[in-house]
Structures are given as C-alpha cells and as structure tokens.
Amino acid sequence: MKRWMRCRVAIGLATAIGLAAVLAPAVPAAEITLSYANFPPAPTFPCVQMERWKTEVEKRTAGKVAVNTFPGGTLLGAKEMMDGVIAGQADIGCLCMAYQPGRFVVTNATGLPVGIPDARTGSLVLLDLFNKYKPEEFAKVKVLALFTTAQSNIMSKVPVRSLEDLQGLSLRGSGPAAQILGALGANPVGMPMSDTPEALQKGVIKGLLSSLEVLKDFKFAETCRYVTLIDTVIYPFAVVMNMDRWNSLPADVKQVMEDLIAEQSEWTGVYMDNHVKESVEWSKETYEVEVISLDAAEKARWDERLKPMTDKWIAEAKAKGLPAEEILADIRAAVEKHRK
Ligand code: 3IO
C-alpha cells in the first residue's frame, strides 16, 4: 500500500470510530420500560415524588429500567387511576384515596380527625396500617408507596375568622375533607384537586380545604388571599402497579422497588412538610396572604362539630365487616409511635 493510501485509510477509520462514539447512546437501552400516570400538574407534590422515584429506580437498576412519567392526567385522570392500573392502561399510577371514599375504607380512616400532626407521621402511619390489614381493595395491584399530605387548612377568597363566616360558603374538598366542610356548615363542593384551579377562576367555589403547599404549586395564593389555620385532616395517597407487570419483573428489579417502599413514603412526607412552610412564606411575601389563627375557645367549637364524623365511619366500616375500633386504635397508637 502506498503511504498516502495508508494515511487515508487511517483517517477514515478514525472518523468512523469517532462517529460511532458520538452516535452511540451513553447508557445502554433499558430492558424494561414502565409507564407511570399521575393526575395533577408536574410542579405539584404527587409528581415531584414520582420524578424522585423514577430517578432512584433508574439509578439503582443501573439503567435496566426506564420509567416514563405522565403528569397532569395525560395518561389517566384522578378518578380512573386505580381501575386504569388494574386494566393495564398504565403500569403504575398515583391516586388520592379520598376521591373514592367507599372504595378505600380502611386507608381512608387516616383521613378522619385522628390527630395526624404532619405528612411524615401520616405517611408512616398509613404504611403501618396497610401492612397490618392488607386491605382487599389492593389485592389486584402491587403497592409501591403510601403517603399523606400535611394537615388541611382553609384557603379562601374571603376571610374566615369564625364558624359564622363559614356558613354556606362554597369550599372545595374531597372525601373526609368534604365531610368536614359539611359538618362545619360550609357548602362542600366535591372535586379532585386537578379540577380546582378552573372552579376557583370561574367562581364556582370561594376556596378550598387542603394542605397549604398548593398555595404555591397551583398559585392559589393569587386568588385565595386568606388562610384559616384549623390543622385538620390529611389526605392519603397510594402508588400502585399493575399486578401482572409486577410479576413479570426480574427479582433484582423487584428488590429495588421493595426497598424503596418505606423510603419513598417517608421521603414524600418530609418533602411535603418542608414544602408547606416554604409555600406559606412565599404566599405571604408574594401576595400578602393573611394567615388567620383561631383562639382556643373558637377552635373548640369547630372540633365539637367534627365528632360525629368518626362515628359515621365506624358504622360504615362495621357494615363492611371491618374491625373499626381496632383500626382507629391502631392509627392513634401509630401516631404516637411515629410523631417526633
Ligand atoms: C393534592 C392533590 C394533588 C396535587 C396536590 C395536592 N395537595 C394536596 C392534595 C390533596 C388532595 O388530593 C386534595 O384533593 O385536596
């Protein structure tokens, strides 16, 4: 071979190798791709925890598993989450159990006024409750995480300083939180959180009862300039996976997900608790949101009204053959065990 030809071959080879290096993906293609559906928009806490889980699973399986996330109800909506996952329309889904109160009787007991002080405690309590009772309504799915919101408070367009201010006021809440609104004399309007921004805009509702991180994440502080602190019930959530899909996973991948259950649940509770503080500060600074506290005598009037709610749940649970009093006692004991 002539020298100039050898030289051209060498250049050609080098170019080919260089191109291959540039074109080849940095990570080998995943063997398993999972879809993960969520109902609210990407900046909200259910989606923040979803992205964290995705990152951890992809990292801990060294790229063997890829998770494709679908926030904002793009794959499944709030109320179709459980059935959609059972049917395999999504491999994984995140749901708020309060949206189907009759379906999740055991886990929704954590949404009663039982004194859950924060989201971290709530998440650990919910996990304990699930592990002890293994409720039948989860038989067709694999539970990957369980967590709760922080305590609910009133966010409204008009100030609520007393029970009288609340009478007939249209406020949005779901499940147990809607019952609380009714018991307090407000006009409860039931709808998933994902429908709330539009209802507030249109004036169908004057506010809502939920955890306060939504002031920032949904920009509710822009329309709701008042917060009344009543520190009432949490909302319980579950992340579930299609059972056939779960059974199809290799053992090492299952192990990664098993190891993440408790960790992810607590992580989400801690994230929520910190984010509530940040959101309230942001709302005060950005929109001069007024935070109203009730004095002890006024608060006692409110709490008095909530007592029949738990009795109603006990009757409902017993009618379904559930050990209602034992479930409530377990929740109260778990609160004491986990609270800091
Ligand atoms: C919630 C649901 C979606 C996104 C953010 C959220 N923060 C609190 C909730 C609880 C809930 O589901 C609700 O309906 O108040």
Image: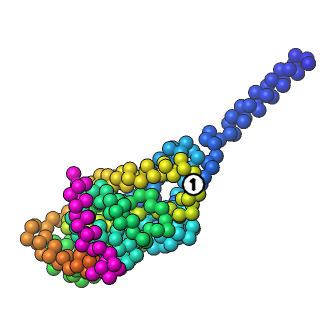
Task: Judge whether residue 129 can be spotted in this image.
Answer: yes
Relative to 321, 11 lies left or right:
right
> Which quadrant of the structure image shows residue 307?
bottom left
Which of 84 and 106 lies nearest the eye of the viewer? 106
Relative to 71, 182 lies left or right:
left
Magenta span dominant secondary structure: helix
> Which quadrant of the structure image shows residue 234?
bottom left
Q: SS at mark 1?
A: loop
Which of 146 and 231 lies nearest the eye of the viewer? 146
Residue 170, horizontal then vertical, whole percent: 29, 79
The quarter in which the N terminus is drawn is top right
Residue 317 is a magenta residue: yes
Residue 134 is a magenta residue: no
Task: Judge whether residue 280 can be spotted in this image.
Answer: no
Residue 164, horizontal then vertical, whole percent: 16, 79
Numbered range of the magenta stretch: 315-340
Direction left: furthest residue: 297
The residue drawn where x is 31% and y is 77% is 317
Is residue 269 depicted above or below 252 in this figure? below
Is residue 181 depicted above or below 217 in this figure? below
Residue 212, horizontal then vertical, whole percent: 29, 62
Which of 162 and 335 lies nearest the eye of the viewer? 335
Which of 246 and 223 lies nearest the eye of the viewer? 246
The residue drawn where x is 88% and y is 21% is 5
The residue drawn where x is 32% and y is 59% is 128
The residue drawn where x is 21% and y is 57% is 336
Packing grade of label 1 (10 A; few <14, some 14-19, many >=20) is few
Identify the residue under disc 1: 249
Is residue 284 depicted above or below 304 in this figure? above
Amino acid carrying mark 1 in the image: Leu
> Which quadrant of the structure image shows residue 144?
bottom left
